[in-house]
Amino acid sequence: MISDNLQEIRQEMQDSCALVSRQLDGVTLVAVTKTVDLETTIELVNEGVDHLAENRVDKFLEKKEKMTDFSNVSWHFIGNLQRRKVKSVINEIDFFHALDSIKLAHEIQKRAEKVIRCFVEVNVSGEESKHGISPEDLEDFVTQTAELDKLSIVGLMTMAPFDSTAEEQHRFFSKLKQLQENIQQKNLSHAPCSETSMGMSNDFSVAIQEGATFVRVGTALFKG
């Protein structure tokens, strides 16, 4: 099942890249394994997926501890991270996808023992229920992180509303790509901002067409 689903997703990624003359190796598939058990996660890694994402601190730490033999895996933490839990998780991950406040940035600076590759979460759609920095506040936020030498702003992240149309998804993802390029062009040492983390199971094809370099796919990998 996983093998077939993975093949289907990789084909869709390839097709999406071809539509806009992109190379597939410019897009990283991040498997969202937060809803599956250890055995299923290991099965996925054995199929060649080496970027895994979790969003619950305890479950992530437990799973990672049991996967020490898989040194090739890059761990991503997605979703809201409470400041009181930063200490236990931040040095265990390779990428953090939800930097959404300056207070959280300072807590990461305080607790990190290495440079943490962070995506700034941007609320492109303007949904009140969504976390994230507003597009209007993004440049100021990035400037505020300049003194924090344990953070590297590698890119931006956003999520389109689940019930959005393809037309709306194109608009949201295009906006994030534009914001990312605007920051990248500033050539800031602390914020290279060359990446975009956008697109999930229901909209990763659109995200790739709009320039996503990381797509976060869970449901489509594990469907029955």
Image: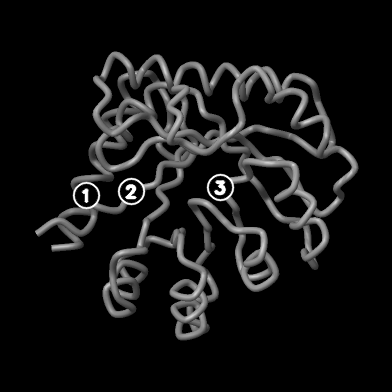
Q: Give the quarter of the figure containing the C terminus.
A: bottom left
**Eyeballing the image, is 170 above or below 215?**
above
Query: Identity of the amino acid at label 3?
Result: His
Label 3: how many Cα within 10 Å (few below 14, some 14–19, many 20+):
many
Comparing marks 3 and 1, which lies closer to the viewer?
Answer: 3
Taking the image as shown, residue 79 lies to the left or right of residue 104, namely: left
Res. 96 mark:
none
Q: Secondary structure at mark 2?
A: strand
Of all residues, the one furthest to the right in this rendering is: 147
Residue of label 3: 97
Q: Is residue 158 above or below residue 75?
A: above
Which three-letter amino acid code belongs to the residue tagged 1? Ala
Nearest to the observer: residue 218 or residue 187: 218
- Give the alpha-carbon distance from disc 3 to disc 2, as whole Å: 14 Å
Image location (x, y in percent) of residue 188: 82, 30
Q: Residue 217 — which label?
A: 2
Q: Which residue is mark 1?
A: 220
Looking at the rendered structure, the secondary structure element under dot 1 is helix
Q: Mark 1 or mark 3, which is nearer the start of the sequence?
A: 3
Q: Earlier in the sequence, mark 3 or mark 2?
A: 3
Does residue 99 lie above or below 108 as drawn? above
Callout 1–callout 2 Cβ contact below 8 Å: yes
Disc 3 on helix, strand or loop? strand
Residue shown at the point (27%, 73%) measured from the top left = 40
In whole angstroms, how far apart are the C-alphas of marks 3 and 1?
20 Å
